[in-house]
Image: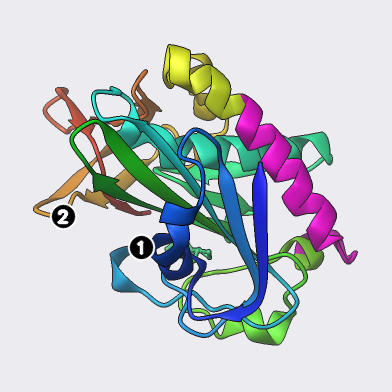
Amino acid sequence: MNEIHLTQIDSTQNYAKAHAEKFPKEEITCFSADEQTAGRGRSNKKWVSPKGVNIYATFYFTLPTHARHVVSLAQLLAYSFTRLLVQKGLNPQIKWPNDVLLQGKKVSGILCETQFHREIVEIFLGIGINVNMDEETASQIDQTATSLFLETGEPWDRRALLKALQIQFQKDLQLFKTAGFRPFQTEFNERLAFKGEKIRCFDGAKEWAGICQSVNEEGQLNLLLPNQTLQTLRSGDIRG
Ligand code: BTN
């Protein structure tokens, strides 16, 4: 994996997009930074990115345009990170589609942006992980946020964690390229937050209410509606 580490940048997503052409399309390049001055989250939200405490990284790679599973790449990265936390003895959950939670609080968020061309699609898969962020900074974030430090009471080595994530993600992407999301579905479902609970989910056009049931083999959410039919959502935001 190619690695580019920056001290300060507006957003690793923006930097990756501006510089992607210099990097091999057949490999993964990881752009990371100590601080972001304009970190971006999903739905045009800001991603709080203080200096030197967290991980801000964008994985850049390409897939063939006809690849079926591009829509579940963010779920894949959430899975890879979750896997690492489980190895460290933690008990993370995944709030579909790709927020990683500890004790019901958000520790990591993922933003997947794509640029489609005739033959290939360029993927900019960004992840923010709250690593050593303190309580005061976490409390300034609009949603219930936490950090690995706050959950474990110990400081974490950011470089070692990013390295471990790079290795895990590279391995998972390899399998994903040939087999899609299917090999990850069972474990993802075991870690699915709100499973069996009544949720509301806004899919960009409509707000759905139902029981959060499972994700299917393409990483989409199965919602059981009050009339007992199953509604499958490709993307959306859960409001628990
Ligand atoms: C979300 O949960 O809303 C997604 C957050 C994604 C944040 C990461 S930090 C690295 C990369 N650069 C950005 O500006 N955003 C993503």
**Disc ID at residue 204:** 2
Give 138 or 124, whichever is nearer the viewer: 124
Seen at 51% across and 14% down, the residue is 183
Q: Which residue is more in the foreground, 25 or 181? A: 25
**Spatial distance from mark 2 to mark 1, Cα to Cα?**
12 Å
Lateral position of residue 215 relative to residue 153, left or right:
left
Residue at the limit of the structure toward the right, as seen here:
154
18 vs 46, nearest the viewer:
18
Considering only order in the chain, which callout, 1 or 2, is on the residue closer to the N terminus? 1
Looking at the rendered structure, the kind of residue marked 1 is: Arg
The residue to which callout 1 is attached is 42
Find residue 52 and name its label. Answer: none
Examine the rendered structure and indicate whether residue 108 appears above or below residue 5: above
Does residue 120 appear left or right of residue 74 in this picture?
left
Q: Is residue 73 magenta?
A: no
Dot 1 beta carbon under 8 Å from ligand 1 = yes
Residue 200 sits above or below residue 227 on the image: below
Q: In screen coordinates, is 234 left or right of 59?
A: left
Q: Amino acid at mark 2?
A: Gly
Q: Is residue 235 visible?
A: yes
Residue 181's spot in the image, x, y percent?
A: 43, 22
Q: Nearer the viewer, residue 239 or 116?
A: 116
